[in-house]
Amino acid sequence: MSSRRPLFVVLAGALVLVGVLSSLSKTSNPSALPGGLGVTPNAESTALYCTGLSGDVGPLEGHVIFLNTTDAVRLVQVQVVNDLGQRAEVSVNVAAHATQLVSPITLLKGHSFALEAQVSGGGVVAQEVTRTGMAQVPCTSTGVTNWYGAGFDTLVGSSGELSIYNPTATPAVFNVVGYTAAGYTAPAPFQGLSVGAHSQMELNLGSQIVNTANVGVHVSVLRGSVTIVGVQQSGAVVSLISGATSLAKTVWLPRVTTVTNAAAEIRVANPGPLVANVTVHVALAPYTIAPQSVTVAPYSSGEVIITPNSAIPANGYAALTLTSNEPVFSSLASGTSAGIALWSPQRPSRDFLVSDFSGHGFDAATVTNASARPITVRFTTVGAQSMTGTATLAGHRTQNILSLFRGLSTLSSVTLTVQSTVPVLLVTTTLPSTPMGVDVVAALDGR
């Protein structure tokens, strides 16, 4: 017996070591390819996943617009699934350089649903658009294992929800935790949640995080992967939130409104054990504005008010850069006293696509160089008779697309790709609104 003791000790020690190494390993998100923009046109097939629109008639009712960026017809096979597990299918052809609209509510009834599309080839992108066109979010081509969304409100008169779809063939298991001004919350009903293969569910944050403003949410997938869209309703204002798949110490918000009667603030969640000292640098010509700061306690949320703010004049759009000594996640909350919309800041990339999915045109459409060195930006219109152009964009500079690409006088009813050879590019668009600039929408990117 004594001769076996050393072997037992060695085996026990090995098991402990394996356990420690496993606990330290991190599950990484797959590379996100929103809308299939990064998929080559000669791919045999591609998949797109959309979730977040409502199955009920109301402000979150909407449709999915498929856009074919190639010279050939694409067959798209669509399956819609609701929160009850019911399914419906339809096939559509999308002509070259054309769009095709699919309205899930005409195919299937239910409180909420997701849409999965199989495309015969590459080069097809998709965007979810609400009935009014004022809330949009790209469909994605892969699931993720971590998702962060900042700034949800569950106050009376508001609702914050997560629309979750499992695009895989096996059940997915995940935990949801929140970060508020009062600190960390991990409600027991939000732990160990499961969504079946190719199934959808909607999680009401307010059922457990009651009557709370500025809730940061982290979804950690324990098994499988999911696609997630945040759904926020604030008064009569609705927004679809793409969220983020990782934390950041630097975030760019190139078009934030400062006009009279508008409200805008940066909502920040700190999921770490150390205090986050957050500073927002504000560029608003011709003014010189002192940086705005907030200290966010560990496992908590906070905000930086941009407007109304006596330190920041009401003068159109400001370009903001957020820096933090600790990794955080954030959102822009903009609107009026009647309600706010949330928008997740994008990360720099090489490729973006701008298209007038809403039919309203754009109030602003800009390119930003997130690096210190000049870059060359290439513009190409999508169509049978495409136009191209290039321009140099100085370091840390934001400029209007139409001022750089002289081939266009408007972006209404236009689809445009914007590219850089290095992943330091940002494209930001806002829709026409009153007050100006309160509806920021995400451009499709090709990370």
Image (cartoon, rainbow, N blue to C red):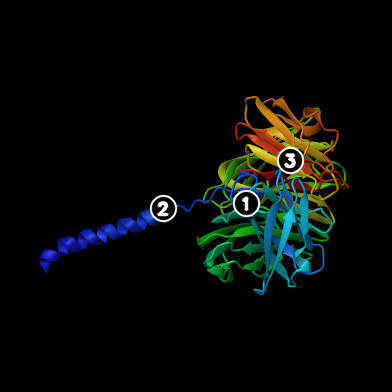
Q: Is residue 146 above or below residue 208?
A: above
Residue 108 locus on image (x, y percent): 74, 71
Which residue type carries mark 1?
Ala
- Camera-side residue of 51 and 384: 384
State the image coordinates of residue 96 (x, y, percent, origin top left). 74, 46
Residue ID at (77%, 67%): 105
Rate crowding at label 3 as few (under 14), some (14 to 19) or many (20 or more) other CA atoms within 10 Å. Answer: many
**Does residue 280 appear in the picture of this structure?**
no
The residue that disc 3 covers is 428
Which mark is first along the chain, 3 or 1?
Answer: 1
How far is disc 1 from disc 2 in space, using C-alphas? 23 Å
**40 lies left or right of 383:** left
Q: What's the residue type where badge 2 is placed?
A: Leu
The answer, for residue 295, to whether it is visible in the render is yes
191 versus 66 height, above or below: below
Provide residue 199's location: percent of width, then percent of height: 61, 68
Could you tell me how far apart the alpha carbons at marks 1 and 3 are, in whole angstroms?
22 Å
Q: Amino acid at mark 3?
A: Thr
Left/right of residue 194 with respect to residue 90 in the rendered view: left
Camera-side mark, 1 or 3: 3
Picture residue at 60% right of the left edge, 53% below the top: 45
Q: Quadrant of the C terminus?
A: top right
Name which of mark 2 and mark 3 comes first in the sequence.
2
Per the image, the residue denoted by label 2 is 24
Question: Mark 1 highlights which residue?
Answer: 269
Q: Is residue 396 above or below residue 125?
A: above
The image quadrant that residue 318 belongs to is top right
**Can you tell which of label 1 and label 2 is closer to the viewer?**
2
Q: Earlier in the sequence, mark 1 or mark 2?
A: 2
